[in-house]
Amino acid sequence: MSVSDFDQAKIITIERHILEEQQVHPEATGVLTNLLYDLALAGKFIASQTTRAGLAEILGSTENTNIQGETVMKLDQLADRTIFRLNDHTGRIAVMASEEHEHLLPVPGRFPVGKYVLLYDPLDGSSNIDYNASIGTIFAIYRRLSIDGPGTLDDCLQPGSALVVAGYMIYGSSTMLVYTSGLGVHGFTLDPAIGEFLLTHPDIRIPNKPKYYSVNQGYEKYWSSGIQHYTRWLQGMDGDRKPLSLRYIGSLVGDFHRNLLSGGVFYYPADTQEPSKPHGKLRLTYEAAPLAFIASQAGGYASDGTRSILDIQPETLHQRTPLFIGNRFLVEKAEEFIDRFG
Ligand code: AFP
């Protein structure tokens, strides 16, 4: 690269990007900007740990105990503690909730509370860690509803349509952070040499021509007739349309990220496998809703099979929901099949 090429190239760090987006909102105080920056920092920390997965054994640990006789924290607990500890003292957060904890995570009494609510899934797809497949962190940020004092459960139980920011970090062949604040979807890749997230995927749009469908087809016998018909349709079995290719990692962030960039649909329907989980496996507040916001900002759509995920009012923190997410026409087709065949 010549000196003049280098001078012309616009190197946009995540900090610069967030600051530039902030200028679109003259009323912004910078609190949200800093909160996003804290999450990016958590992502760097988690990435540095996930790339060392497996080394604990080589370094002499047995089961959960390392060579010094200390308990080794599982990576999902480590990710959970990292996000909490980077955000508990900043005065930006009213309350947090995590996939790892049944109850709310209040801001410790010695720290000030702020105006935002943070819900997160610290390490989604963690059963893939041992096999070196992509895993991710999902986050959702709302404005608190309560006026002051510690944040409440109601602050956390807001529909996706009230989201202020949603994003994820994906720990794969590289580490990426993808987020939206309602001004499009932007992706940043972590340059490990300098420890910075750089803008590599500005204004992501789901391609109009989809490539993939993603579902755990091993569970087909537990599906309703509507889902079985829909899957046949995606495979082009009911006409002369070309089939979509099947890709499924079993790691929501990885499956969603691939389909966001290549076009397609991911679904995890309700099934009859476990009567105790009549609504499928995925969680509404910190999995489905934030990804639905990202999908909609990228020109896509997410549904529970009958209505937009963004319109669902959560009733409990860890509520499960069926999820269909990706290109709008593919998700609407799922709604049609469910409406017709159940
Ligand atoms: P784990 O965190 O236990 O690996 O679960 C991952 C997950 O919640 C989500 O990331 C996947 O989309 C989904 O489960 C995969 O579930 P199946 O193994 O039932 O297909």
Image: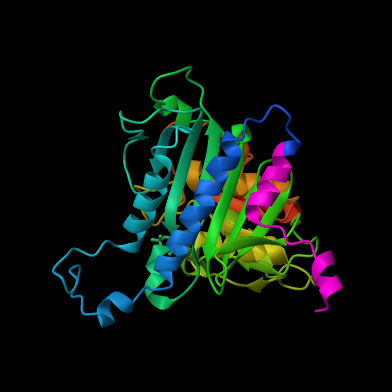
State the residue in front, 278 or 4: 4
Q: Foreground residue, 86 or 203?
A: 86
Q: In percent of the image, x 54 and y 58: which residue is there?
A: 169
Q: Residue furthest bottom?
A: 58
> Residue at (49%, 33%) from the top-left corner?
92
Q: In which quarter of the image is residue 79?
A: bottom left
Taking the view exactly as shown, the residue that stands out farthest to the left is 69
Find residue 253 and report its horizontal and vertical position in percent.
Answer: 54, 60
Q: Name the dominant secondary structure of the magenta segment.
A: helix
Q: Find ligand 1 in the image and state its quadrant.
A: bottom left
| Viewer-side residue, 28 vs 3 | 3
Residue at 48 percent of width and 66 percent of height: 250
Query: Which quarter of the figure is the N terminus placed in?
Result: bottom right
Query: What percent of the width, then of the height, locates residue 83?
Result: 42, 49
From the viewer's perspective, tell me whether residue 275 is left or right of residue 287: left
Q: Judge whether residue 13 is colored magenta.
A: yes
Residue 151: name its quadrant. top left
Figure check: 32 above or below 199: above
* Residue farthest front in this picture: 3
Q: Position of residue 56 (x, y in %)?
A: 28, 75
Q: Give the range drawn in magenta.
A: 1-22
How many numbered marks have been drawn onto this rendered protein structure? 0
Residue 314: give x, y in percent of width and height: 49, 33
Residue at horizontal 39 percent and vertical 48 percent from the top: 277
- In this view of the protein, can residue 36 be seen by the observer? yes
Residue 307 located left or right of residue 23:
left
**Could you tell me if residue 336 is visible in this image?**
no
Q: Is residue 327 magenta?
A: no
